[in-house]
Image (cartoon, rainbow, N blue to C red):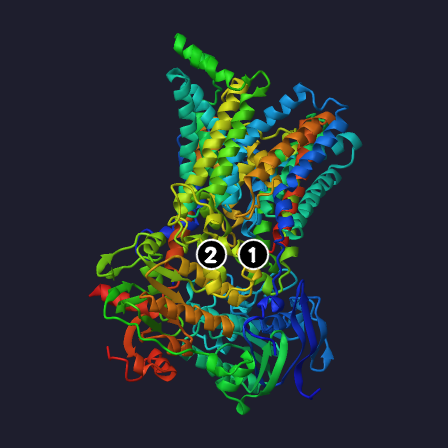
Amino acid sequence: MAEGCALEMRGISKRFPGTLAVDKVDFSVKHGEIHALLGENGAGKSTLMKVLAGLYHDYTGDILIDGVKKDLFSPSLSKEAGIGMVYQELSLARRISICENLLVGRLPKKNALFIDRKKAVGQSRELLARVGLETLDPTLDVSEVSQCDAQLIEIAKVLGASPSILVMDEPTSALSSEEVQRLFSILRALKEQGLAIVYISHHLAEIFEIADMVTVMRDGRLVDTFPVSETNTAMLVEKMVGEPIQTFYAEGHETVSREEVLRVEDYTRWGFFHHVNFSLHRGEILAICGLAGAGRTEIARAIMSADPVDRGKLFVHDREVRFKSFGDAIRGGVGYLTEDRKVVGLALPQSVRDNVLSCVIDKYRKGILFDPDKHRGLVKKQIEEMAVTPDDPDRQVNSFSGGNQQKILMAKWLAADVDILILDEPTRGVDVSAKATIHNAVRRFAQQGKSVILLSSDLPEIVGLCDRAVVLREGHLIGEIPKAGISEKSLLMAANGEGEYVHAG
Amino acid sequence: MKNEKKPGLNLNFINTNRSYFFLLLILFCGLFAKNFFSAYNICAVTGNGSLVIYLGLGFTLCLIAGHMDLTVMYVSTFASLLCLGLRASSGLPWAVCILLATLSGTLVGLVNGILVTKFKIHSFIATLGMQFVVKGAMYIYTGGAELSIGRDYALNEALNGTVGPLPVSLFFLITTAVTFLLMAVLRYTAFGRNLCMIGGSLETAWLAGVNSSLVTTMTFIISSTICAFGGALNGIYSGSASITMGEKGISPLMIALTAAIIGGTSIYGGKGSVVWTWVALVAIAFLKSLCKKTELQVLVIAAILIVCIFYETLAKYHRDRVVGTRPNLRLEYLNESRK
Amino acid sequence: MPDKKAATPQNTDARHSDSSAFSRIFNKLGIYVVVILLILLGMAVSGGQFFTSGNIQSILEAVALIGMVASGLIFVTYSGNMTDMCIPMEMAFAGMMTVQCINFGFWAALLAGILTGALIGLINGFMIGKLRANPIIWTWGFNLLLSGIVRVVWGGKQLYADTVAESTDFAQRSAEQFYSISRTYIGGIISLMAIVMIVMFAIAWFIHAKTAFGQKLKIIGTNYDVARFSGINCTGTLVLTYVLCGVSSACGGIFYAALRKTASYENGTGYDFSCLTAVLLGGVLLSGGKGSVVGAFGGVIAYGILNNILSWVGLGTYEKYLVQGIVFLFIVWLNTYSNRKLGKA
């Protein structure tokens, strides 16, 4: 194919028992190019990148690195071929020093047997400098630095192997906007040096900012590849979804009342959020917007008593409450859909039914008895409303796609029958149709006179769904945006501390 | 977030070096006992306590890598039986007998490693099962008989004898040398650092291309080899070996586990030191000589073990509650609390 | 263009599952197939002596004790905490307490023993449920401590009910009653121990399948954090789990002491291993959240028959260790392997 291609994937297919995850995909990246890879969940882009990472030995098709065919049957072969993978989940060992994490597997040796510590520290300082962390002490344990720094260390670590092709999977998920800009400048510098960079992200805005080319995948197949300059958001979404963008967001609603259902006053947990005040009204969908790390999840966890609160009060239905446990909070009418469905959201090896009923075991028990079979009706109703496919309540949850899993998680919380639902990134990593289903469910929920607090970094989601937004930045509530003023621009500005809705102090 | 340095008693320091404090405590108690610091006593106590040091080394090594090795005890017993048995039946030179006995441990370690890495069985469970396999194999070899070195005293006397002015037996010196050799491997070689990395986070190691299967298997091999070596030497040192060695009193396996934990090796893997275990085992050996009643020994050692586990568990519990604080906000908090 | 609404993401999905009804039933009851095979093997090996009342009784006797303890261990394994290493001392301590208290009457002594097991379980449950201690290391260390306590309190000696009992009529009769529990045969044929075991399994089945506790345990066993973030009271549930194990081990220990007519700190040695083998044999996965009581019951029976067969083949205690070790490893491998086939993430 074209010359100057650092990476060329030709006709790649990967089959799993029962499904064809990647179907004859062609994908190539030139030296000095940042190429974005776009697609919904289940589109196959993660699998394609896993093939590149050497995680599968049974793919078909050819991979050429600089024109030379390579068989990437193991992660070490992939690394040797010059491929560097930066994963979303950090691969650092928390109890081990930064230096040893950066150089794991390649510690400099004094001779055949012994390692050279001084050299190791020196080399790690160099690596850290490449991501702007030159002042960080490499002998610290990873557990002693912030999440943001850890993410950058991860990137430094991958750079340390001098890859010629860098694959970044949602690298900005835990970064603040300054760090994103820092990352982008590092990526641009690497681009100048001739690196070929694959950039996977759901954030279309980022792609327009940093990428040169974009490839869209759908249902395991390649849809199209074109330069970023020749496209726009609407076009990209259309390619991803296969449907006109009108179905992206439905119309709004008017059900907000003046009755206050939840209020926090001077809510403080030292080191996480300080002096937060906001209130939630009946029928309202309130957004707490902010950049990653602002403290949104921490506030939600504190309300649910999963974390301790050092100062302040919580009022639910005008009565001051201090929930003693998560279960207590649910009984008090507040629910929390957690951020990560795979880790703390769903019991993956269990059936849909067991998951959907997991919040209400005590609620529906008769004395000491509880029979999940007796609640088939409830479970069926929930999964039908959430359009979970296939709608088999006995199927194990880990056999469903990401979008369906998220819908099951949503169904679980709808079944919990709470008045106030806190949703933490409810459509992260979810395909567009599942996203729409979840959004409609949220609206229905509010229309029934219940209330929602939405924690999201997905700006269009907030714009399309919410009645009001409060802005959190570095643990402080710095502003409030009424419905009329909510737009992606105003949200992003406010999250960065600027704009008319941010009050001083 | 680094701990702020507090003036006065630093709990962290005491905790990290608790094995040394433990030894000092026991030695202090020894001041009140008769003949405690006599050359004879020191020599005998350290010599008799050497076998379990080998077990402790192996166990600690596996613990740092995030695994447990329950076969340490029977591997060493088997090796001592094999060593004495080979000598008695075939008259081979001691060196050969010791070598062959040690290799039996290597073999068991290899099997353990394969069970854990290839068959993906949890190490506790895998070695729990292997323990019985080795125990049974021992019996089949000896038919239940107890073996002794008969009149073959030369090496026995050498091992029991002191070296130079030090009041310790050669056996103990060899044991100590093995300990420090192992420590050097752990701290200064790539293999050792990889071992710690596997214990710290298996994923990190795997993603970095460290061959965690190989390192894990090597860990088990080294552990069992060391135990077998110690067992073989112990058979010569004490002059006899039997299957039921160590079944009265506290099981040597429990002592090894206890010493590893009391010594300061983390039960969660990644952090630890074989030297700490060595210190703790020396302390326990002296404790046993101070307190002759088995019941009391068990109680005291177990009580200290429980305290250590409790402390580590509590520390982790608190750590998990505060993970993730943002530095700027923490500064704010400090400012506000000063007002 | 495929219709987006009807398209199941399944066909682009990387995951696969094996949840057909047949395989689920087989996983549950497959052990009984093994039981039948073992019985056939036993008949072959024993030269027709397998079904004599003497042989059946000796199988049931061995099985009864393991079964009693296993009926409680199931819950610990199901909760994802692998095993309870305190079982040996739960058994031994309960036996000692029962014999020591024989002067207060048979039933009071029984209660004392059971409460001992419950108390040990309570402490375990707190450490593991609330403080999240490492379940193996904590219970193993605690077992050692209990062993030390028992040894110190009773001076390392063994207890005999008839010597502990005062010379009053009441006390002596209580001691007799105590000895008889392991020697009673209902209708002259079925041992009381076997009946107690079956009753305990029935109760365990009920608790596991029909109660809210069982359902909660299923989630906790799958993923502790998911359970916590679903509002389940993990501490309380795990405390109850370990109490159940403590109580059932105590039962086993009491019957054991009655059988051997001796209470000692060594009663119960080896039961942690054999009960775990039986439970795993019955299909309860080590990783937690999967398995059935019915299966575990089959596992206990299979284990008993296997031991019986080994005796017929002429293996001594130590040779049996070898075989038991190999069988155990094989079962565990099967356990882990089938776990991954069932598509656990």
Figure check: A426 above or below B101: below
Relative to C278, A420 lies left or right: left
Chain ID of residue with mark 2: A
Percent across and percent down for residue C272 are: 55, 35
Please, which residue is most extreme toward the left here? B339
Helix, strand or loop under label 2: helix
Q: Name the image quarter holding the N terminus of chain A.
A: bottom right
Relative to A300, C195 lies left or right: right
The answer to whether one can see residue B21 in this image is no
Q: Amino acid at mark 1?
A: Arg
Of residues A196 and B180, the one drawn nearer to the viewer in this rendering = A196
Of residues A75 and C194, the one drawn nearer to the viewer in this rendering = C194
Figure check: C120 above or below B273: above
Figure check: A365 above or below A503: above
Q: Name the image quarter holding the C terminus of chain A.
A: bottom left
Which residue is depicted at the point 42% across and 42% down?
A369
According to the picture, the residue beneath numbered tag 2 turns out to be: A379
